[in-house]
Each structure stands twice: as structure tokens, then as C-alpha cells.
Image: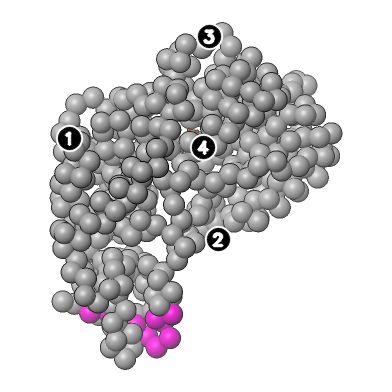
């Protein structure tokens, strides 16, 4: 067993059960890619078992803090079973569910989503990469499913020195699927879609959106960064008269259009714009258009704190435009999925946007990732998605 010895004082975060060891904390030791290592403090006492990533700044990701734990196939089966069993008791209103959420489920570098009869996995670091075959077999065994598609094309792989890999890992067939969410049907493609195919983390926000649209009888809705139209279908299900969906991805908009039709809504109630959201909002403002509800769910603008300042300006500008385009009494659903922007900062940004827009607005609901995207208490980095539902009062 290879050993990684830490510098004096560098054991503190591990003692708090944080699962990462940075390269700068290491006094000596090394191992192959994904190999299990024993992490010890400067005096040789045991701290954790973890997976070694030779070329990443995050040099070790912890599998277990138990000195008696063997890191073998049985260990991975247990961890997977624990994560999957937990979700099976929740009665989630969807057959699209995140079964494994990386560090927060004790499996750093592994994400597994289930869409109906199909599993989709992302292996983003050297540890899960090394155990891929064991993990794949265990996933099929525990779920009783036969199809597992790999989407290891996340940019994080480059930091680990791993190439991009996609394709069927087990089973095969069609990659285009349909799932149920809150009683709606949504088509997606696990090979061609973003991430693993769909944004499951926003499931509850889409339900809330439908509820607000229904309760406040919001007629004219704008869905900015619509992707495959999850919020578009939600707004229509809530009774919206007309929804404008904007995205810069043509294939995503095609899927959005198909999803509207799949749910029996009239396509004449919808406009789909293959365009930049910021430019579109400016054009709407110049044309004097207004909306009863606006959804702004941009991609990750600040992956880390280092990008926060520039991203903050971009978020503020988007939200300023959104608030200006809302009719008094209208509702803004605004999101940030940037790990580098905390919830407090996001609220400040939206407050600044309202000030610049010259509108009086108030937060009426706070949102976050759906429960199948837990945030480990020892792993605050796992908190990335935050949402504010904001009502314009005047
Ligand atoms: N709300 C969606 C998820 C949005 S993901 C859902 O519920 O499923 C972010 C989307 O923003 C992606 O589809 C991406 O294609 C789109 N996007 C990124 N930059 C954009 C831009 N400048 N203008 C328009 N769309 C953009």
C-alpha cells in the first residue's frame, strides 16, 4: 500500500471530513493514477484512504476515513447501494433522478443519473476511472437495469490528465429517451445533450415555476437559456398563454419544440429564438416589450471564486434587463449554477440589478438543487445551484 504523508498542520481539513488533499499539503509520497493510497499526518498517524490523481492539484480524493475499511469491489457496491437506496425511498416526482452525486454521496468524481431504463455515468477523476468496470457492474446489479451510457466528456477530466470518453459502457441501443417529470413528458438524448442529457437539478424549480404561473395567472412568459424547454413546458402546464424560449443551441431548441408538442400544447403559443439571451433582452427593451414572468438560468459563468468578479457583472446585467422587462406584479425566476458565486453574493447581485433597473422588487422564494443533489455537510463546494423567485412590485 502506497502512502501519502502530509506536511505538519495540513491534516486539519481531513479531520473535519473534507474529502480533498491538495498537492501543496503533501510532504512526500506518490502512486499511480487512481491507485488507493493511505493518507497520513506528518507523524505517521492514519487520516484516510483515497484515490491518487498524479497530475491534478487535488492530488487525493478520499474514499473512507475508517482505518479498517478495505477499498475493494464490495466497498463500491456498498457505497452505490447506499446512495441508490436513499433515493428510492423519496418518491421523487420523476423517472429522471440523480443516483450518485460525487463527493456528497461519498464517491468523489462519480455522477450517475437514471433516465427511465437508462443509466448515464460521468467519471471525472482518476479514482472512479480506475474502478470503472467494477462500478459499472455494480450499478447494473443494484438497479436491475441493462443500459449504461458513459458521458466522461466533462472539462474536469483534462485537469486529471484523462481523455474524453463517451459511449455505451453496458448494453446499447437508442440514446433518445423520454422521461416523466411532474406528469410532463420530456424528451432528451443522453449522447447529444448537455452533461448527462438533462438538468435534473432544476426539477423542483420547474415545478415551482408552474405553480407561480398558475397562482398568479402569469400569461406572457420568457424562458431565457431554455435548453430543451423544461421551464417552457412548466409554464405552459401552469397555464401560460405564450412562452418565448431563447437558447444559443439549435438542437436544444428543436428538442424544446418537440417537448412542447409531446405534452399536447399548441406550438402557436410558443416562440423559439436561436439567439444570445443578453442581446435578445436588449432588443425586447428597445421594442418596448414586457413579460409577466421571466426565467433566467444561464450556464456556469463563474466556475471558481477567481472568476467571480467578471461573472458578477454578467449576472447583474442579465438580471437588470430581466427586471426592466417585467410588468409590475410580474415574477423573475433567476438562477446561478456557479460554484464561485455564493448565495449571499447572488442576492446582492440581484439587489444591485434591481437598483440599477429602478424597480422595487422582493424575494418571495429561495430555491436550490433538487434533493437528489445533496450537499455533504463536510463538502460546502457541493453547493452550486441557487435560485431566487423575485416579484416586481413597482
Ligand atoms: N433551464 C434549463 C437549463 C439551462 S442550461 C433547463 O431547465 O433544462 C444553460 C443553457 O444556456 C444551455 O442550453 C446553453 O445552450 C444556453 N446558453 C449558453 N450561453 C447562452 C447565450 N449567451 N445565449 C443563449 N443561450 C445560451
Which residue bears the numbered disc 1? 146
147 part of magenta stretch: no
**On-image quarter of the N terminus:** bottom left
Front residue of 267 and 71: 71
The Cα atoms of the two marked residues, 2 and 4, are separated by 29 Å
Q: Are marks 4 and 3 in contact (CB under 8 Å)?
A: no
Q: Which residue corresponds to the image point at 26% horizontal and 33% vertical from the top-left?
A: 118
- Mark 2 and mark 3 lie on one chain; the one further toward the N terminus is 3
1 or 4: tag closer to the N-terminus: 1
Q: Which residues are magenta?
A: 3-12
SS for dot 3: loop
Question: Which structural element holds mark 2?
Answer: helix
Q: Secondary structure at mark 4?
A: helix
Quadrant occupied by the C terminus: top right
Q: CA distance from mark 4 to mark 3?
A: 24 Å
What whole-number distance in Å separates the C-alpha atoms at marks 2 and 3?
Answer: 45 Å
Residue name at image x 31 percent, y 25 percent:
177
Q: Which of pointers 2 and 1 lies earlier in the amino acid sequence?
A: 1
C-alpha span from label 1 to label 4: 28 Å
> What residue does disc 2 label?
306
Mark 1 secondary-structure assignment: loop
Q: Residue at x 48, y 60 (%)?
A: 381
Mark 4 packing: few (<14 Cα in 10 Å), some, or many (20+)? some
Vertical relation: 285 (above or below) 164: above
Tell me where residue 249 appears, x and y as whole percent.
47, 28
Figure check: 172 above or below 351:
above
Of the numbered discs in the image, which one, if any, rests on residue 204?
Answer: 4
Cβ–Cβ below 8 Å for labels 1 and 4?
A: no
**Mark 2 or mark 4: whose residue is earlier in sequence:** 4
Disc on the earlier residue, 4 or 3 = 4
Confirm or deny contact between disc 2 and disc 3 (CB under 8 A): no
Give the residue at mark 3: 266
Amino acid at each position: 500500500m502506497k502512502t501519502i504523508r502530509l506536511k505538519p498542520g495540513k491534516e486539519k481539513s481531513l479531520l473535519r471530513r473534507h474529502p480533498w488533499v491538495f498537492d501543496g499539503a503533501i510532504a512526500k509520497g506518490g502512486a499511480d493514477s487512481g491507485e488507493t493510497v493511505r493518507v497520513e499526518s506528518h507523524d505517521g498517524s492514519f487520516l484516510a484512504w483515497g484515490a491518487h490523481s498524479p497530475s491534478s492539484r487535488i492530488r487525493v480524493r478520499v474514499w473512507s476515513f475508517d482505518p479498517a475499511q478495505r477499498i475493494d469491489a464490495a466497498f463500491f457496491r456498498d457505497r452505490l447501494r447506499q446512495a441508490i437506496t436513499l433515493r428510492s425511498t423519496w418518491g421523487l416526482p420523476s423517472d429522471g433522478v440523480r443516483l450518485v452525486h460525487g463527493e456528497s454521496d461519498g464517491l468523489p468524481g462519480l455522477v450517475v443519473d437514471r433516465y427511465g431504463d437508462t443509466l448515464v455515468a460521468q467519471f471525472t477523476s482518476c479514482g472512479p476511472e480506475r474502478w470503472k468496470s467494477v462500478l459499472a457492474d455494480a450499478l447494473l446489479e443494484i438497479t436491475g437495469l441493462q443500459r449504461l451510457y458513459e458521458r466522461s466528456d466533462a472539462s474536469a477530466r483534462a485537469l486529471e490528465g484523462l481523455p474524453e470518453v463517451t459511449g455505451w459502457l453496458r448494453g446499447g441501443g437508442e440514446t433518445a429517451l423520454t422521461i416523466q417529470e411532474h406528469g410532463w413528458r420530456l424528451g432528451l438524448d443522453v449522447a447529444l445533450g448537455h452533461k448527462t442529457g438533462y438538468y435534473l437539478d432544476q426539477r423542483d424549480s420547474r415545478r415551482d415555476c408552474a405553480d407561480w404561473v398558475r397562482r398568479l395567472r402569469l400569461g406572457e412568459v420568457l424562458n431565457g437559456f431554455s435548453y430543451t424547454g423544461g421551464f417552457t413546458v412548466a409554464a405552459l402546464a401552469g397555464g401560460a398563454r405564450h412562452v418565448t424560449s431563447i437558447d444559443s443551441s439549435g438542437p436544444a431548441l428543436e428538442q424544446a419544440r418537440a417537448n412542447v408538442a409531446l405534452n399536447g400544447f399548441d406550438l402557436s403559443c410558443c416562440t423559439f429564438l436561436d439567439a444570445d439571451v443578453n442581446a435578445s433582452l436588449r432588443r425586447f427593451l428597445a421594442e418596448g416589450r414586457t413579460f409577466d414572468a421571466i426565467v433566467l438560468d444561464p450556464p456556469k459563468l463563474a466556475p471558481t471564486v477567481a472568476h467571480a468578479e467578471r461573472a458578477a457583472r454578467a449576472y447583474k446585467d442579465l438580471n437588470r434587463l430581466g427586471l426592466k422587462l417585467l410588468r409590475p406584479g410580474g415574477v423573475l425566476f433567476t438562477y446561478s449554477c456557479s460554484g464561485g458565486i455564493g448565495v449571499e453574493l447572488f442576492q446582492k447581485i440581484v439587489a444591485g440589478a434591481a437598483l440599477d433597473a429602478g424597480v422595487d422588487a422582493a424575494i418571495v422564494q429561495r430555491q436550490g438543487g433538487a434533493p437528489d443533489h445533496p450537499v455533504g455537510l463536510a463538502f460546502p463546494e457541493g453547493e452550486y445551484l441557487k435560485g431566487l423567485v423575485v416579484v416586481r412590485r413597482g
